Amino acid sequence: MNKLAKEKQIQIIAAMVEGMGINAISRLVGVSNHTVLKLLADAGKACAMYQDGAFQNLTCTRIECDEIWSFVGAKNKNASPEQKADLNYGDVWTWVAMDANTKLVPCWNVGKRDGAAAYEFMMDLASRLKNKVQLTTDGHHAYLEAVEDAFGGDIDYAMLIKIYGKAQEEIRYSPAECVGTEIKVISGNPQKGLISTSYIERQNLTMRMSMRRFTRLTNGFSKKLENHIAAISIHYMFYNFCRIHKTLKCTPAMAADVTKTLWSISDMLNAINQFMPKPPSKRGSYKKKERGCLKRQSLFVFMDEF
């Protein structure tokens, strides 16, 4: 059967979650780029499905959310108007939620930086939480309606708005210095000492260091949106279940009581195996078709008559 050995799968996934690109993984493991991309797509879908079922009824109490920029195919400034309107091309944003106490990332969403993506992201987050939480986001206006629709008034929600020293139109193209912050309480009674986005912003650095597709100023960016989403799913599966957090001395999934044990990449592959595509069935022995034999026999009988 044409099935990649598990040892090779472990090597590919290990290189992938440490920030290596597809070409480098292909050279290191000794397989084709197509093989690496096929495993990326299959394992990515399986990781997303597994975590979707595992992260339910979470007892988180303090959530931080943020969006991180990346692009697929080309940046928006280099894309045509038709490409900009297509989600599969141009700038994409990954909306991420993190439990500030356990460092667990229970959900994420890939889309544009608009109200529709914010709504989908917040509805997903609300469906996974068991109890009332304190939520902190940045000042992006799309959060306001999305949080209201997902949680209603049953949440302690505040925005941490950064104040920059440059005009807003200049921030997009050059680094801007943050000269201060403003806290804006939106609903409930959040504890002001816990209103922060520091953990989720640090997590953005983890994403850029651990996924080649998020590295700036390289040609390792995603060429297909499906592969971009799959890489994120594998990254968070490894981050939540296999990577020990230096402060917690355990994985985020262990701290959140999602699992009791430390996983290896082999354990991770075993867990998602039920969601992976089935290998091709073994081909049986070759059998001659009787109809063909009958045709040849009838030809011989026809020749004997003459």
Image (cartoon, helix red, strand yellow):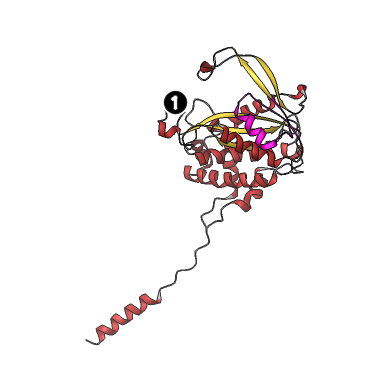
Give the x, y percent position of residue 241.
69, 40
Please check the rendered image and state whether residue 72 is part of the magenta-colored stretch, yes or no.
Answer: no
Q: Where 97 falls versus 295 (above or below)?
A: above
Give the x, y percent position of residue 4.
54, 50
Q: Residue 259 falls in which quadrant of the image? A: top right
What element does badge 1 sit on? Answer: helix
Q: Where 224 falls versus 283 (above or below)?
A: above
Q: Residue 13 falls in which quadrant of the image? A: top right
- Kindly identify the amino acid type of the residue bearing the numbered disc 1: Lys
Kindly identify which residue carries mark 1: 77
Of 267 and 239, nearer the camera is: 239
Q: Residue at x 65, y 39 (%)?
A: 123
Horizontal side of residue 88 vs 182, given as left or right: left
User: Which range of residues does the magenta coloring cover?
Assistant: 131-158
Give the x, y percent position of residue 225.
50, 39
The reply to whether residue 50 is visible in this rendering is yes
Label 1, residues with CA under 10 Å away: few <14, some 14-19, many ≥20: few
Q: Where 94 falls versus 13 (above or below)?
A: above
